[in-house]
Image (cartoon, grey):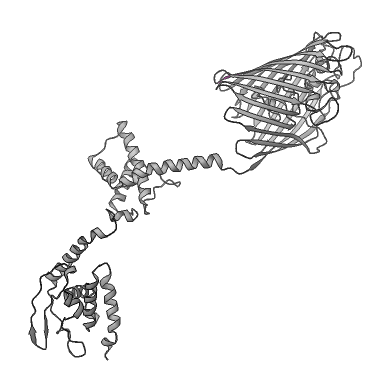
Amino acid sequence: MNKFSQTKSDQFVSINAYLWQGITLPKNAQRAVREALKAIAIPLNHFSPALVSTFLLLFAHGSYAAQNNNQQQTKEVRSFSPLTELPQTVAEKSSIPHLPSASSAPGNSRNLPKINLVSDARQVLEQIQLYNGNSANNSLNQITNVSQLRDVSPGDWAYEALRSLVERYGCIAGYPNGTYQGNRPLSRYEFAAGLNACLQQIERLIAGNTESFSGNDLETLQRLTQEFETELTTLGARVDNLEGRVAFLEDHQFSTTTKLKGQAVFNIAGAFGDEKALAGEDDLETSGLDDNIVFNNRVRLAFVTSFTGKDQLTTRLEAGNFDNFAQAATGTDMARLGYEASGGNDVKLERLHYQFPVGDKLQFHLGAFGVTFDDIANPINPFFESNGNGALTRFGQRNPALYRSGEQAIGANIKLTDSISLDLAYLSGEAASPEDKDGLFNGDYNAAAQLNFALGENLDLALSYARYFAPGEDVNLSGNTGSTLAKTPFGAVATSANRFGAQASWRINSKLNLAGWVGYIDASAESGAREGDHADIWNWAMNLAVLDVGKEGSVLGLIVGMPPKATNVDGGPEDEDTSWLVEAHYRYPLTDNIQITPGAYVIFNPNHSDRNDPIYVGVLRTTFSF
């Protein structure tokens, strides 16, 4: 057996596999071709695959002419009919004459069958197309365009057309690096998204008559729109669905998060004057003022936690080493700083406060410790209320008639209209104690309400009221900012009070803000020999903030006011004269996180007595925030 016959079966498999690639024939035709393949012993290296396939198809239909052993044998070439009409004799008996094998025909290249390739190949292709057409009703649904199966690649006319529109009209902003990556394939939906962007941009330009367009551009757009009509139609639905899913995730996906916020205050200060202030008219003994320069500090670390993304739990720790400029140092609470923290730098819990919304117009507050009314309601003093970055004096931060009482609190903020809101709070000073005259409702309390008005963009006004009660020793009507009589006008007896306040802030222009308040307390003795006695306590203040002096973010502040003063006290002494507090400071931002505030304040007629000499206090405060 020669080398050709040894590989005959392999050759048959190869030809057979190639023949069926991409061509569908009836089973009887397939059997006929297989019989013909078995009869062929011609080496494959004499034929191209296309030639072999064409020859076999011709052979299966009986259209050939062969010459063997110098004898001509002519067989009539049949007229073609559809392959489904192939005669059974061809398929079953394989009556096709055998060709000479390579072993018995030297010079086999001269003895090959002569085939009319031009006409017969054309007829074969026509028959294949005719057969496929007859079988179309039995096939699966076909796509209308083969381009629907692939991405849009660089070099495609659509790709180049869109690139031209992008470069001409700037309708695709590009990727984050500022480029339009025109060197990579795009999916049809990516391409449709870019085409949609160009359509919208060009529609806007046409509507505004800002640019002329050539007919070629419009024709290109029309052709692109027609070819990608399906993708453009479904693009809007896909975007709408995506926006809905994103909105759902934004509303529902949130992980519990805790942020650390901190503030450190370095304070250098000193009080100056001839003598300490006398407490009242009956106080005749006094001593020299302690005029030492002190260096104090206070540190606060706040852990701000959210469980839903809309609520907030504040846990604040504090440590400090202030000995305040109050009775012991100056003889009056009017000289106190607004950011003092005592305790020898021992760390303690300073605030525990949780707030959460209910709907769009209601916010609830639960204050377990260290929460006062100004943590629930806005004191309307935008540039000086901050404890650490605001006013130097305790009195200058907010109206002491309303905002200086409470430890535990329950409160709510109610939005009535876009410009009117209502703040409500119930505050207690001894809610944690189960002892007599303590607790949430039997100890001292402050039930407060504040109505807020936003009168345009530059004017805010608040009207406040609070009902106050303290049993005996816990009485403190002035929040440690005024005279002794303003704090306890009847002594250590049960005291009730109706508190009133009006606060306002006016943004005059971008550089000036004017704010102020007035507070009034109607106090009554509720026990003891003075039960039923009344006293009036007044205070007021005005401040001016000059912004961006020397540097953006800086504040030059001036505060003038009268600390709480007791007048019209039934059955006892009252404050005869009037104290004046004047403060000036300049808050300068060294960086976004460091502010330095030099300043000074003076109290004239301390404790509302003209017998007392003025007290001067100088301060250099540095605040680190992070």
Q: Is residue 66 left or right of residue 271?
A: left
- In front of the other: 561 or 253: 253
Quadrant hosting residue 384:
top right
- 368 in the magenta segment: no
Q: Position of residue 529 (x, y in %)?
A: 89, 12
Q: Is residue 472 left or right of residue 356?
A: right
Q: Is residue 198 left or right of residue 300?
A: left
- 457 in the magenta segment: yes
Residue 82 vertical placement versus 280 (above, below): below
For the question of whether residue 424 can be seen, the reply is yes
Q: Position of residue 622 (x, y in %)?
A: 71, 33
Seen at 16% across and 81% down, the residue is 95
Q: Is residue 455 left or right of residue 519?
A: left
- In front of the other: 27 or 482: 27
For the question of whether residue 562 can be seen, the reply is no
- In front of the other: 542 or 294: 542
Q: Position of residue 406 (x, y in %)?
A: 76, 26
Quarter placement of the C terminus: top right
Residue 23 vertical placement versus 75 (above, below): above
Range shown magenta:
454-461
Seen at 90% across and 18% down, the residue is 286
Residue 289 vertical placement versus 433 (above, below): above
Q: Position of residue 289 (x, y in %)?
A: 86, 22
Most distant residue in the right direction:
285
